[in-house]
Amino acid sequence: MMIETKKLVKTFDGFKALNELDINVPKGSVYGLVGPNGAGKSTVIRHLAGIYRQDSGHVLIDGQPVYENNAVKSRIAYIPDEIFYYPQAGIEDMMRFYKSIYPKFSAERFEKLRASFELDSRRPMRKLSKGMQKQAAFWLALSLCPEIVILDEPVDGLDPVMRRQVWSLLMADVAENGTTVLVSSHNLRELEDVCDHVGILNHGRMLTERSLSELQDNIVKIQLALADGGELPSDLNILHESRTGRVRQLILRGTAEELTNRISAVSPLFMDVVPLTLEEIFIYELGGVDSEVKDSVL
């Protein structure tokens, strides 16, 4: 694994933010770390970036500990939600700073990316809008030629055209260089387009961690209607059910093939399998959410 945490524990003032958390991010993958507010996502990311020191457990990149390990951290580009910059610095000033501490920083790539962002590199970053500061952060991060990119709410503040541009540049690095990307975002629709692995975090623990295709194969939405007196098989694992007249909508755990075969045995009047979005998978994996909230995303 490229990125791992093993039984990671972090406590703040008696509150256990991370509780023996295990994460496994394959090399060359785009891994979406999702969870409700307060689940511990940003705390995990700050451990992976080497900012926080764990109370116990392990935080590893290619088997090497991250905290106070400059050799490992030089391989990582980290873009937080709130961008850091020196108060009077422009983008070119920050470029020279990055170049002085990151051995693989490429001035050639920095110049090539200039056309992608179209920012005034001499203007103080404090005078740039939040969206422009985020663009500058991507410009600088991609110029590091990183092996790992860690992103916390990465495209917040960017317009739709720039969002697409940034993701296109990142996906090109993944495809051409085997770059590993870990991204935390509340925009699940956007993650669904780019991620191949997903970890769902809740209360500082990993609820489930799978490839996106496995997640989508393991929870199924089925719409059906039964004949009068017809009953579903009693042992179905139904996560949620709603009705509109005679039409029943079920969220079930299992594969589409297995479930349709079992339900077909009771001869439904009709049955249709509907693909689940990552947002729906997130809600039903979490469980315990009000049915009104569940219904609102169906």
Image (spheres, grey):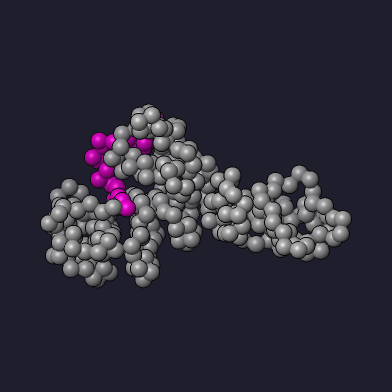
| Residue at position x 32%, y 53% in the image | 81
- Taking the image as shown, residue 233 lies to the left or right of residue 73, namely right
The spot of residue 120 in percent (x, y) is 18, 68
Percent x, y for residue 11? 37, 32
Is 73 colored magenta in this rendering?
yes
Residue depicted at 66% across the width and 51% down the height: 240
Q: Quadrant of the C terminus?
A: bottom right
Give the quadrant of the N terminus.
Answer: top left
Residue nearest the viewer, comparing 287 with 179: 287
Residue under the image location 23 percent in, 51 percent down:
84
Q: Quadrant of residue 293?
A: bottom right
Q: What residue is shown at x 15% (from left), y 65% (from top)?
A: 123
Determine which quarter of the picture holds residue 2.
top left
Q: Is residue 143 visible?
A: no
Q: Residue 120, can we see it?
A: yes
Q: Position of residue 246 (x, y in %)?
A: 78, 62
Magenta segment, which residues?
57-81
Left or right of 170 on screen, residue 125: left
Residue 13, compared with residue 161, is above or below; it is above
Looking at the picture, does residue 66 appear above or below residue 221? Answer: above
